[in-house]
Image: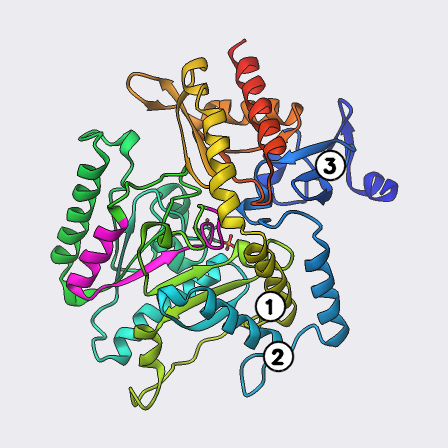
Amino acid sequence: MTEFKSNFLREHNGRHQFHPMIHPLLSQANPPQIIVSGDGCYVTDLDGKRYVDGFGGLWNVNVGHNRREVKEAIIAQLDKIAYYSSFAGTTTAPSIELSAKLCAMAAEEDADKVLFSANGSDAVETALKFARQYWHLVGEPGRFKFISLKNGYHGVHFGGLSVNGSSYYRSSYEPLLPGCTQIDTPWTYRNPYTEDPEKLADMIATLLDREIYHQGPNTVAAFIAEPVQGAGGVIVPPASFWPKVREVCDKYGVLLISDEVVTGFGRSGAMFGARGWGVKPDIMCLAKGISAGYVPMGATVFNKRVASAWYKEVNPTGFIMHGYTATGHALGCAAALAALDIVEREDLPGNAAKQGKTLLEGLKPLEASSSIVGEVRGKGLMVGIDLVSDKAKRTPLDPANGIAERVAYYAREEGAIVRPAGSTIILSPPLVINEEEVAKLVNALRVAFVRNEK
Ligand code: PMP
């Protein structure tokens, strides 16, 4: 560690700073933090300070850090073989076992087939490609368009960026895919027309209906959205929103893609986010929690409707070429099998629902006590603290003034890592979090907001 420090870091005011050649976004952080170890819900940085991990790595370390079971599964697989392709006539045992496991876990969603990849952006790309492929295979190649939600986040590849709902992420990479449009987000807090969640759900579902109608139903391939918007600031749609979306998609035969990269495997309090609304998507994008951050991993799960079109007995064209080198990576699949075993054995969706409620209740008083907190909202262990410059008007705080970063920095000094994202502070701790750790997070944030008022 001493050699690492002298080779790569310089000390400034008693803290270690990055060598500037690392990722440009990181060198903007001040002071950036280097995490060297973790256990359960805690991580330790290079300066030896221990923190409650209020962000779970990046929404993904659901089973907690340094879990023996996952490490042992990875080592056991390494002792056999790290990798062999799942492609031209070969595969490995863990990839078959994991496909079976995912189809069993998503039996309620009619899951039938799985395509593996290496991360969430790949899982989304696969979903979009296969939504189009489906329409080619069933003889309607004119269905190429995608509709998504404003403010949604779907990763960094060109397909995902094209359905991304925020120009902040999109604009420097345009032109993107043609035929991608966005409708409004069912965001009760920021909607100028109604505060009644059910009316809002109706309004947005009607917008979707109108958008499909306007685009021409026989040109629309799929609607894609996150069950709960994550990176966009933890936006939880009203109770009837998802069932209504399913209804509209069915009316026009449009495929429903649920981007479960964050919500999948318990984070929003149900095994899959859309299941929390009693809705069955046609395609689910999975990553993050699937392998809990131990090894990169992604998967796209298809229901019977979509997968049946791949087979020559149904369709003379059959499955069209697609696959990554990392598809079905044996280490990723072994890690995922071990992580998902923990998710089920320890009922992490149940714990996320229970601890998420405590976390939300603990942070709610900030709405009254802090002059800059407009709303504390969330579902399961996805919680957002919305920062405003004018409470009455609900004007979002300008992210450029760095207040979210300042509050996150104070929280860090109080022993908790949380994520400043635009005008929201986001929490998504490991799903194994307990009452004591929730209390520590709440306390660190309370102190951080008090310090911010001074
Ligand atoms: N979809 C959603 C909903 C996400 O939140 C993310 C990443 N935060 C992605 C896709 C992309 O995943 P990855 O960063 O693993 O490529």
Q: Earlier in the sequence, mark 3 or mark 2?
A: 3
Q: Is residue 61 left or right of residue 48?
A: left
Q: Identify the residue at the far right of this view.
A: 2
**C-alpha separation, residue under disc 1 versus residue under disc 2:** 9 Å
Residue at the location (38% across, 48% down)? Answer: 170
Q: Quadrant of the C terminus?
A: top right
Image location of residue 337, percent across then percent down: 60, 65
Disc 1 and disc 2 in contact, CB within 8 angstroms = yes
Point out which mark residue 92 bears. 2
Which one is nearer the viewer's eye here, 260 or 410? 260
Q: Which residue is mark 3?
A: 45
Q: Is mark 1 within 8 Å of ligand 1?
A: no
Callout 2 crowding tier (Cα within 10 Å): few <14, some 14–19, many ≥20: some
Inspect the magenta stretch and tell me whether residue 31 lies in it: no
| Sequence order check, earlier mark of 1 and 2 | 2
Q: Position of residue 413 (x, y in %)?
A: 66, 23
The residue stretch that appears in magenta: 242-267
- Which residue has dot 1 on it? 333
Q: Is residue 92 left or right of residue 309?
A: right
Where residue 264 appears, x then y in whole percent? 46, 54
What residue is rendered at 62% in x and 79% in y? 92
